[in-house]
């Protein structure tokens, strides 16, 4: 059996009761934190909380060489842990398909996601979100200006009146040369940096910052991108939402919950 478990959004307590019970029953625990991380807990915290050792795998150890994970699942009950919900990344879907191809039973235990938290914290309705996108660091995508993967998604969603969730880049063990480096500091794009990039390379539109979703002190703030670019939103993780057409309840929520200036809130 290979069980995929989402750890939730912030720390060791963000996991569901079902997920914690599955960890207690497992023989081997594996994890990856290159697609996302728990800012409120490190691996040692998780091991102490669950009373078990966790083997953390890098990208190559999950995507190119998952043999150890699959072997553990063939001979016993293995668990694969990720921050957020466990099936958001195609990396995890691929690992599940490999297990199924080898006749290994799989199970998925879900957890809160940044997308559901962004909707809940901002008051923007989840069914009014379009396709999401990720804003990479300049040095990571190797091109001048904003990549088309970001601007095209923004244009398409706004044409349809839909909100756009923008994930902000995370680089785990990365250095400016563009090569992986286990000794390098992890780097997190902050919302002020993202807002400046978008204000200069796209349009200076209304946007909403969501910082530290799932933590005891989440922050939500809405304004023009150029204004958000001047603020300090504190510790990561951060994300941005560019609203589309607003229902009157959504407009009220942005003004009340995120401090959006009323003159920026046009209701459909």
Image (cartoon, rainbow, N blue to C red):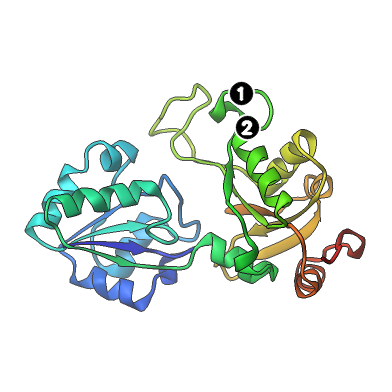
- x%, y% of residue 66? 21, 43
Task: Please tell me whether residue 256 is drawn above or below residue 163 in the rendered image.
Answer: below
User: Which residue occupies the foreground of this view, 218 or 43?
Assistant: 218
Task: Please tell me whether residue 202 is drawn above or below residue 245 in the rendered image.
Answer: above
Q: Quadrant of residue 153?
A: top right
Q: What's the residue at 57%, 23% (across, down)?
A: 142
In the shown orientation, is residue 59 left or right of residue 36? left
Density class for disc 2 (Cα within 10 Å; few <14, some 14-19, many ≥20) is: some
Mark 1 and 2 residues: CB-CB less than 8 Å, in contact? yes
- x%, y% of residue 68? 16, 46
Q: What's the residue at 26%, 53% (across, down)?
A: 96
Q: What's the residue at 80%, 41% (across, down)?
A: 203
**Looking at the image, which residue sits at the far right?**
263
Q: Quadrant of residue 86?
A: bottom left
- x%, y% of residue 42? 41, 56
In the shown orientation, is residue 130 left or right of residue 104? right
Mark 1 — residue? Answer: 143
Mark 2 — residue? Answer: 147
């Amino acid at each position: 059996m290979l069980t995929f478990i989402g750890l939730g959004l912030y720390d060791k307590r963000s996991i569901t009761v079902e997920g914690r019970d599955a960890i207690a029953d497992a023989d081997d625990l594996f994890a990856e934190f290159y697609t996302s991380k728990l800012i409120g807990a490190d691996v040692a915290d998780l091991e102490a909380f669950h009373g078990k050792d966790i083997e953390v795998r890098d990208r190559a150890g999950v995507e190119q060489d998952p043999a150890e994970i699959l072997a553990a699942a063939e001979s016993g009950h293995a668990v694969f842990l990720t921050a957020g919900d466990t099936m958001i990344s195609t990396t995890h879907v691929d690992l599940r398909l490999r297990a199924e191809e080898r006749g290994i039973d799989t199970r998925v235990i879900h957890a809160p996601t940044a997308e559901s938290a962004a909707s809940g914290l901002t008051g923007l309705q989840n069914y009014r979100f379009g396709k999401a996108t990720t804003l990479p660091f300049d040095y990571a995508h190797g091109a001048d200006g904003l990549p088309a993967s970001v601007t095209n998604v923004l244009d398409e969603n706004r044409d349809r009146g839909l909100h756009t969730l923008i994930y902000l880049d995370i680089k785990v063990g990365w250095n400016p040369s563009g090569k992986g480096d286990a000794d390098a500091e992890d780097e997190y794009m902050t919302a002020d940096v993202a807002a400046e990039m978008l204000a200069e390379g796209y349009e200076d539109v209304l946007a909403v910052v969501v910082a530290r979703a799932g933590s005891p002190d989440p922050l939500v703030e809405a304004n023009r991108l150029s204004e958000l670019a001047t603020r300090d939103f504190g510790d990561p993780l951060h994300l941005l939402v560019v609203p589309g057409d607003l229902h009157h309840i959504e407009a009220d929520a942005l003004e009340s919950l995120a401090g959006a200036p009323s003159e920026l809130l046009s209701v459909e």
